[in-house]
Amino acid sequence: MRILLIHSDYLKYETKNKTGIAEEIPEDKMQGDFRESLVVFTAVESGDEDNPESVIENAVNEIIKVFNDVKAENVVIYPYAHLSSSLSSPKTAVEILEGMESALRREGVEVSRVPFGWYKAFKISCKGHPLSELSRTIRPQPPKVEEESEESEWFILYRGETVKPEDFEFKNRDLENLVKYELGELESSGEEPPHVRLMREKGLADYEPSADVGHLRWYPRGRLIRDLLADYVYMLVTSEGAMPVETPIMYDLADEAIRVHAEKFGERQYRMKNKKELMLRYACCFGAFRILSDSFLTWKNLPASIYELSTYSFRLEKKGEVVGLKRLRGFTMPDLHTVCADLDQSLEEFARQVEMCMRTGQDLQVNYEVIFRATADFYEEYREWVHEVVDRIGKPVLLEILPSRKHYWIAKMDFAAIDYLGRPIENPTVQIDVESGERFGITYVNRDEDEVNPIILHCSPTGSIERVICSLLEKTAIEMDEKPPMLPVWLSPTQVRVLPIAERHMEYASDLVSKLIAGDIRADLDDRSETLGKKIRNAAQDWVPYVVVIGDSELEGKLTVNVRETGEKLQMSVDELIERIRAETDGMPFRRLPLPVKLSERINF
C-alpha cells in the first residue's frame, strides 16, 4: 500500500462521474467538506491481497502515529489510485479501505472515507509545517505458515515400474538432462542458445529494440513459418472436432473469477489501468471460459472443445530470463479447452489428446521427453490409468508426485524438446482442471436434468509457436555435425531454388519456376549476376531442400536435382520433382512464398 498523508486546513470534494467499479453511495456522500484533517491519500496494491489484515493493522498504526504528532482533529481516507501502478482488485481495495475506517473508529479516531471508484473534483489546503506532507509504503507481514510444505517425489516410470532417478540407468542423454533440470542439478553455462544466432542468420526474426524486452519483429520467412505452424495446429484440432473461436487479449480484474485465476501467475502479469484495471491475457483461458459460461450445454454435447490461437499472449517474464524464441513476454499460443462431463470422460479425452501431442512431435520431426505430474491422491486412485497413458509414450517418463494440489489441475503431462545446451524447451501440454468450471460458472445439464460443473482439459498440442521454431532450430544445431541442417520440407520457406548458369539459360529456368509454383511448390529463381559456386553456397545457407542447376544439358533432357538432406544428385523431370515434394509434404498445410520470386528483387532485411 502507498499512502500520502497531508495535514490540511480543509479538504473539499465533489463526485462527478462513476467508473465501472464505483461503490454505491448515499446522496450525502456525493460531496464533502472537512476541516483540520489528516487526509490519507491511499492506493491499495496487488501485494496487499496476500495479507489484507496485516496491511490494515500496519496502515492504521502509522496513521495514528502521524495523527497524534500533528494533533489533527479527524482523519479522512481518500482513495487515490495514482500513487501506484500495481493496484489490487477493486473488491480487495474497498475491503481494506473499509477495514482501515473501522479500525480507526475502534481506536477512538473521528474518521471519514471518501467514495471509491468515482471521478472527483477536490481542493485541499496543506498547512505547510515540517510534518504536514509525509509519504509511506505499508507492507503486509507474510502470512504465517504453520508447517513447511512437503516436497514432490520424483520417479522414472517405464513399463509399469517406478524407479528413483538416482537408481535409474539412463540410456537417453535428453531424459537425463530433463531430470537434472527438474531436480535443480543442471547448472547454467551462461551461453546463448544457438537458435538466437540462427533466427537472425536465416532472416526469420530478431529482437525489436523499440518494444519491451521479449517482443520480436518477424521477417517474411519467419512469418511464413509461423503461419504454416498455425495452419497445422488448426487442421489438427479441427479434425478432432474442436470449434475455433476468438476472444479479447485483455480482461477486467474487477471480475472475481478472472482475478483469482490470474493470481496463479503472480507477478508475471502485464497490467494496465485506464478507468478499469486490465490485464493482458497470458493464455486463452479467460475468453474461452466466458464463452463456455454463457453457453447452454447438455451431457449430449460433451466432450466439447473450443480452440483459439492467441496472437498474442503476454507474460511478464523476468528480464534476465528472456531469450530468443524460448522465453518471451509476447508469444503465440495454440490453446484448446475441452469440457468433460466427469473425471472418467476427462481421462478418456486426456489419453486421446496425449496421442495428438505425440503426433506433433512426429510431424515436426522433434524428439520430446515427457513429464507426468499428478497429486498423490490422484496417482493413488488412478495409478493403473497413469501407467497405461505413460506406456503409450513408448519410453521412460519422469513422474512427479505432488503431496497435495497446489494448482487448478490434478494431473498434467508436459512434453519438452531438449536444446543444444541440454535444457528443456516446454512444448505440448495436457492438463485436467478441476477448479475453473465452478469458478467461472460453467455448467451443463446432466442426464438427470441437474445443472453441474464440468471438468475442463487444457491442451496446447505444440506449445507456443515460437518455441516450436526454437525446438526446430536447436535440433539443427545439435545434428549439424551429422547431417546438413534444414527444416522439414513443408516448413522450408523456399522448397526449390533454380540456378541458371548463364543468361541463355534464364528463360528455361524462369519457365521451370513457374511450373513448380503452379504445382504448389515454393520455388524461387537466383537470377543474380553471381558465379554458380556462390549461388550454390547461398542456397545452402538458406537451407533450401532442393536445388536445380540449369545448364546446356538440362535444356535438352531431365533436371539434375541436388537433394540437401541426403547429398544426392538425382535425375528427374519437373513432374517427378513435384510429386516427390508433394509426397514429403502430404497432409501438411501449404502457403505461397511471400517474397519476390527473383532473388535480385528482394530486400535484404
Image (cartoon, helix red, strand yellow):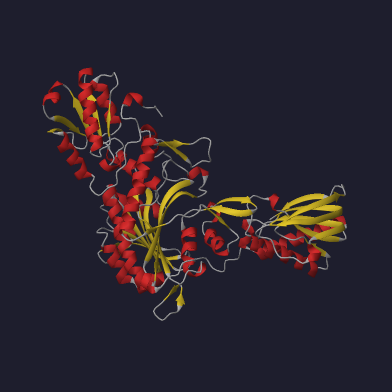
Q: In the image, residue 480 lies at what x, y percent?
A: 27, 37
Residue lying at 50% horizontally and 62% vertically, measured from the top left: 290
Give the side of residue 51 with respect to residue 311, left or right. Answer: right
Could you tell me which residue is drawn at 49 percent across and 46 percent down?
A: 329
Q: Relative to 476, is 91 on the left or the right? A: right
Residue 30 quadrant: bottom right
Q: Is residue 12 above or below residue 227?
A: below
Dividing the picture into quadrants, the one containing residue 556 is: top left
Counting from the top left corner in percent of width and height, residue 36 is at 88, 57
* Residue 492 coordinates in the image, percent (x, y): 29, 39
In the image as oriented, which residue stretches furthest toward the bottom?
Answer: 448
Q: Quadrant of the C terminus?
A: top left
Q: 354 or 523, which lies in front? A: 523
* For residue 173, above or below residue 49: above
Please identify the quarter of the rendering in which residue 471 is found: top left
Q: Can residue 255 be seen here?
A: yes
Residue drawn at x 63%, y 52% as measured from the top left: 86
Relative vertical location of residue 9 with respect to residue 227 in this rendering, above or below = below
Across the whole image, how many numbered discs are drawn on residues?
0
Q: Which of the two residues, 137 or 93, is positioned nearer the viewer here?
A: 93
